[in-house]
Image: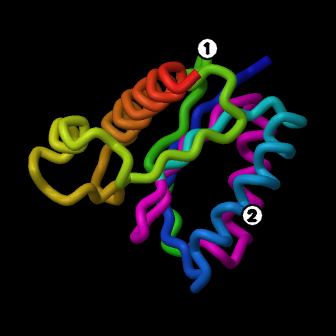
């Protein structure tokens, strides 16, 4: 099976942003499991940075649906490439709020500037998401 990784950023247009995000998360977890897609989503009140991994045809179809959705705006594809393995394990829809990210991690990826994923390269955005996913796994493991 040919796998792909797609990273993009968008802005939410819905006035009820958190309600819309929770609705998206609930539906996406079900749909992603059925399509063998894993996702990590970094939420900030100004943007949503996402990485989607899975079968190439499913990732492509999902991104086309996202582009037709009227909730996000200013969608920008940071990068897309074929991959041999997933970078985020078996998370069907990981959700991390920017406010919950370790300040030192933010500093390392922003060099002291405000986090603006619209200016990140595909590689830098991917490394950022892998780092915060690992930190989130560690946080969840310590809560168990």
Neighbor class of circle 1 (other Cα within 10 Å; few <14, some 14-19, many 20+) is few
Residue 84 numbered mark, or none: 1
3D distance between C-alphas at marks 2 and 1: 31 Å
Q: Position of residue 49 (x, y in %)?
A: 47, 52
Judge left or right: residue 117 versus residue 106: right
- Dot 2 lies on which element? helix
Rendered image: mark on residue 36: none
Which label is found at residue 23? Answer: 2
30 magenta-colored = no
How far across and down, in percent of the image, does residue 83 sit?
A: 59, 21
- In percent of width and height, residue 10 lies at 50, 64
The answer to which quarter of the image holds residue 85 is top right
Taking depth in this image into account, of 15 and 55 the one nearest to the observer is 15
Q: State the residue in front, 103 or 47.
A: 103
Q: Quadrant of residue 44?
A: bottom left
User: What residue is rendered at 22% in x and 40% in y?
Assistant: 109
For the image, the number of numbered tags is 2
Residue 105: % across, % down: 24, 36
- Give the residues drawn in magenta, as a range: 43-72
- Quarter of the image with the N terminus is top right
* Residue drawn at (48%, 21%) of the image: 142
Q: Residue at x 34, y 59 (%)?
A: 118
Q: Residue furthest left?
A: 112
Q: Is residue 102 left or right of residue 49?
A: left
Query: Which of the two marks, 2 or 1, is nearer to us in this view?
Result: 2
Name the quarter where the C terminus is drawn: top right
Q: Is residue 67 magenta?
A: yes
Which residue is situated farthest in the front direction here?
144
Q: Is residue 29 left or right of residue 98?
A: right
């Amino acid at each position: 099976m040919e796998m792909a990784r797609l990273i993009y950023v968008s802005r939410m247009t819905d006035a009820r942003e958190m309600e819309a995000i929770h609705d998206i998360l609930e539906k996406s977890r079900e749909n992603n499991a059925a399509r063998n897609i894993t996702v990590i989503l970094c939420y900030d009140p100004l943007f949503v940075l996402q990485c989607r991994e899975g079968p190439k045809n499913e990732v492509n179809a999902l991104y086309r649906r996202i582009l037709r959705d009227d909730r996000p705006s200013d969608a920008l594809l940071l990068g897309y490439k074929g991959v041999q393995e997933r970078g985020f394990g078996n998370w069907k829809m990981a959700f991390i709020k920017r406010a919950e990210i370790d300040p030192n991690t933010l500093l390392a990826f922003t060099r002291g500037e405000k986090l603006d994923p619209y200016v990140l390269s595909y590689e830098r955005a991917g490394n950022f998401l892998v780092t915060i996913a690992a930190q989130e796994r560690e946080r969840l493991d310590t809560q168990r």
